[in-house]
Amino acid sequence: MLLALLGFTLVVQLRSNDGDHGLASARQEDLVRILSDLEAQDARLLADIQNLEATRQQLSSGVQGREAALAEATRRSEELGLLAGTVPGRGPGLEILLDRVKASAVLNAVQELRGARGEVMQLNGSNGAAVRVVASSYFVDASGGGIIADGVHLTGPFRLLVIGQPETMRTALQIPGGVVASVQKDGGSVTMDSRSLVEVTAVRKAAALQYARPVS
């Protein structure tokens, strides 16, 4: 709008001068002065236009740059939160029921799912306890039955929720000699259901690092 207004002002000024019949009888010195004034005004208007254009570009790129940086930071924060287990997750995946299994079978299932690009996992016990499975998760058999997962006692059967590509993960668990075959050989069972929406609600508290620092 500013550019249009400046251009309109210049055109009106030129037409006004062109329409002034007094110029026909003006002296040469006066004509030279008028022409010089118009050229100076034109130069000032062009400079104003260039400055306004440069300011517009700077403001535009600055806003876009800040917005892009903020969007990227938000996306990375959400991804890291999902990996660290500090935020809930949702997406397509599998709901897996593990019955009459030991901690080693749960660990094998988790590792196989990670290899099949399972992204977010949660292990539920029939006693109502739930654990968000992350890179540091561990599973051991509990005395008296059930397992200990990250310090939480879970009783079977266990329900493992995992977000990822359902068919890829299902195939990984069903390979010959894999998780399903091993569990069945030991007298347990594995039931898998593909879901268009799996909701992982268990979260963990963010751990404060004491020694590690990023490399600058």
Image (tube, rainbow, N blue to C red):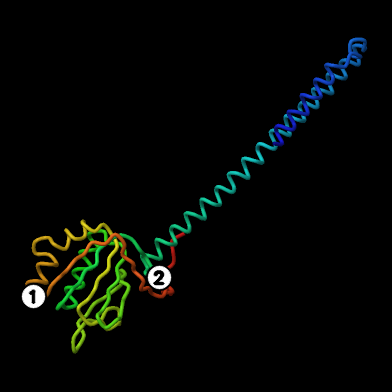
Mark 2 sits on what residue?
86
**Residue at 8% over, 75% down:** 186
Above or below, 69 relative to 186: above
Q: Earlier in the sequence, mark 1 or mark 2?
A: 2
**Residue at 24% over, 73% down:** 159
Q: Quadrant of residue 2?
A: top right
Position of residue 169 in the picture relative to residue 163 (left or right): left
Pick the quarter of the image with the N terminus: top right
On the image, the x and y values in percent for residue 179 come to: 14, 67
Mark seen at residue 186:
1
Position of residue 209 in the picture relative to residue 143 (left or right): right
On the image, the x and y values in percent for residue 105 come to: 16, 73
Q: CA distance from mark 1 to mark 2?
A: 35 Å
Task: Tell me the amino acid under the disc marked 1.
Answer: Asp
**Residue at 91% over, 14% down:** 22
Residue most toward the left? 185
